[in-house]
Amino acid sequence: MIKKNPHILLILFTLILLTGSYLQAQQRFPKPEFDSGYLQPNPTQPEPRAMALEYFDVLVLLAVLSLASWLAIKKRSRRGLLWLSVFSLIYFGFYRDGCICSIGAIQNVALSIFDSGYAISITALLFFVLPLLFALFFGRVFCASACPLGAIQDLLVINPISIPSWIRKTLGFIPVLYLALSVLLAATGSDFIICRYDPFIGIFRMDGPALMIFLGITFLFLGMFYARPYCRIFCPYGVLLSWMSKFSRRHLTITPSECIKCKLCEGSCPFDAIEIPVEQSYRTPEVSRKNLKRFIIYIALIPVLTVAGGWIGSRSHIFMSRVHPDVYLAELMISNPELREDEENLDIQAFLESGDTFEQLVEEAAVIRGKFRKGSMAMGGFVGLALGITLMNQVVFRRREDYEPHKGDCFSCGRCMDYCPVEKNVNL
Amino acid sequence: MMDKKDKSKDKAYNRRDFINNGVRLALGVSVVGTAAFTLQRSATGKDYVWQIDPFKCTQCGRCATDCVMAESASKCVHAYDLCGYCDLCGGYLKPGAKLETGAENQLCPTGAIQRRFIEEPYFEYIIDEELCIGCAKCVKGCSAFGNGSLHMQIRHDRCLNCNQCSIASVCPSDAISRVPASEPYKIKGEFIKEEES
C-alpha cells in the first residue's frame, strides 16, 4: 500500500495539471463586454530595421572595399585610406552600432554549417566572404579602411614601439587559438564569444556593461604603444585574411617603381610589417645546411603537432563542453542535487518549471558533449597544424632584394608609402 | 630579348608564381565553396530578429539587467485581447501606495503601468514604455493571478539586433530565439503556445 501511494499522488498531480492547463486556455477572467462603446487598442509592434537597409550595408561594404583597393594599389594615397577608414568607423561603427561585422560573421558561418536548424542571412554571409575575396586579390584592404574596429585603433596609434620578432610571432599565434575556440563554440551552439568579448562595440553604442567599456578603453590605451593590439593579438578574422593576403594577386607596395634601399621606410610601419632585404651573402653553406636540417625537423614535426593537438583537444572536451548552458546545468544538478530546492538559482528553477524531465536534460547534454568531443579534437588538430606550419615558415629562406611589406601581416594602411622618396614612374 | 641570367631568374619567379596562383585558386575555391555550402544549407537565406516566446518565459528578470543597452530592449507589452480589465491588477501599483516589504514590491517598480477607468468595474491598463525597465514583475503577477495578458516582448525599435543576443545567452528558460524578420513579434492571442514536439 505504501508503495502504491506515490502513484496515486502522481495521478492526482497530473489531473491537477491537466485541469490547470484547461483553465488557462479558458482565461480566469473572461473579457468583459463593454456598454460604453469602448474601443480596445492593440499593442504596438514597431517594425525592425528594414531589410533593404541591410542590403544597403553590403553595398557600402563593397564600395568601401573597392575604393580601398584602388587607393592602396593604384592611387597610393595614405590620406585617402585614412579618410575612408574614418567613414567606416562612423558608418559601420557609430551609425550601425558595430553589428554585423565580418569578424563576428565567422560564427554565423560556423553555426550554419554545423546546425541545420540555423539559416545564415545573406548579409552575414556576404560580410564574411567579401573581405576575404578582396584580400585574395588586393591584400588586407578590409583592415585598412573597412573595419571599424581597426579604424578606431588605427586613429589612436600615437607612439608605437617596435616589438622583438619572437614576441610578435608568439602573440600572433593567439588569434589562431581564438579562431579555433570561437568556431568550436559557435558550431556547437554554445556561445558567440567574438561578439561577447568584442572590446569596442560598447564604445560604438556608447552604452554597455562596464567590463566591455573598460576592455575597450584598455585596448585603445594599449594601442597607443602597441599599435592595433586587438588586430594583432586577438582578431580571429585576421587569421583568415592573412592566409588570403599571403597569396594575394596584387598587394600594396612601399615603392611605386624601383626600391633604392634608402631605408627611409624602415621605421615607418607601426606594426613591424616591413621586411628588410635579405642579402644573398647571408646564405652561406653553413647557414643553408643548418636551415635545411631545421626545415626537415619542422616538417617532421607537423604531423606530430597535429596529432598532439588533436589529443589535447579531445582530452579537454569535457572541460570545454561546460561552456554550453545545458551541459553546465546538467552537471550542476547531478553534482549538487540540493540546489533543486534553492529558490535563488534561476536556471534550475526555470528548468524545473519548464516541464522537461531531468533525463531529457542529461540526454541533451550528452549529445552536446559528443559534438564537443569531435569538435575539440578537430580544433586541437587544427591548432597543432597551424603551429607546425608557423614553425616551418621560420626557416624557409626567401631572397629579398627590396623593402617589402609582409603580405600576411600588412594591414595596407599605406603609412610606408609616404616615406618612399622614389617618384612614380609615369611610363609604367 | 633576355640574356641567360635573366632567364634563370625569370624561371625561378615563374615557379613561385605557379605555386602562388595554385594556392590562390585553392583558397578562392574554398571561400566560395563555403559560401555556396552555407547558402544551400540555409536555402532561403532569411533574415532573423530576436524575440521572446511568452509561453516559455519564466519572468526571471534577467531581461532588465542583461541587455547590452542600459535600458533593456525587452519590455512588457499588453495583449488587450486577453485582459480581464480587472480592478485588482497583478502588476499595477496604485499611485501613492507605500512600497514596503510586502506585496507592493511585486508590482511595477517604476509606475510604468497606468490605468484608465472605463466603466464599472473595468479598468484599462496602459504601459508607458519609456518607464518600463523590463523587470517582468507585472508579468509574474499577471500570470499568477490574472489572465497573463501582460508579457515580455523585445521591442524592435529599441533592439540593436546583435549577432548574439546577450539576454538570450543567459535566459534560463531558452525563451529567446531568432525568429524570421517578417514575423517579428509573438504577442499573446495572435501567437498561441507552440505544441511541444
Image: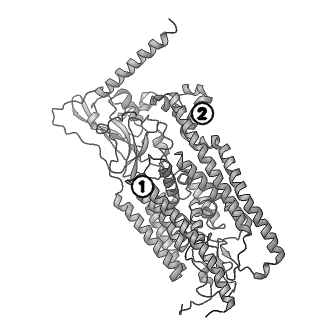
Label 2: chain? Answer: A
Q: Give whichever of B32, B168 is nearer the camera.
A: B32
Relative to A408, B99 lies left or right = left
- Residue B100 visible, this angle: no
Q: Residue at position x 37%, y 30% from top?
A: B143
Q: Looking at the picture, how far across and down is residue A101, in whole percent? A: 49, 60
- Give above or below for A55 relative to A250: above
Q: Looking at the picture, how far across and down is residue A226, in whole percent? A: 66, 66
Relative to A293, A323 lies left or right = left
Q: Residue at position x 65%, y 71% from top?
A: A271
Give me the disc on residue A8: none
Mark 2 residue crowding within 10 angstroms, few (<14) / some (14–19) / many (20+): some
Q: Give whichever of A207, A130 is nearer the camera.
A: A130
Residue B149 position by quadrant = top left
Q: Looking at the picture, how far across and down is residue A26, in whole percent? A: 28, 26
SS for tag 1?
A: helix
- Residue A274 visible, this angle: yes
Label 1: chain? Answer: B
Give me the disc on residue B40: 1
- Give above or below for B196 relative to A217: above
Front label number (2 vs 1): 1
- Give above or below for A382 relative to B2: above
Relative to B36, A156 lies left or right = right
Mark 1 residue crowding within 10 angstroms, few (<14) / some (14–19) / many (20+): few
- Give above or below for A234 relative to B193: below
Q: Give whichever of A392, A235 is nearer the camera.
A: A392
Q: Amino acid at mark 1?
A: Gln
Q: Which residue is mark 2?
A: A331
Q: Amino acid at mark 2?
A: Glu
SS for tag 2?
A: helix
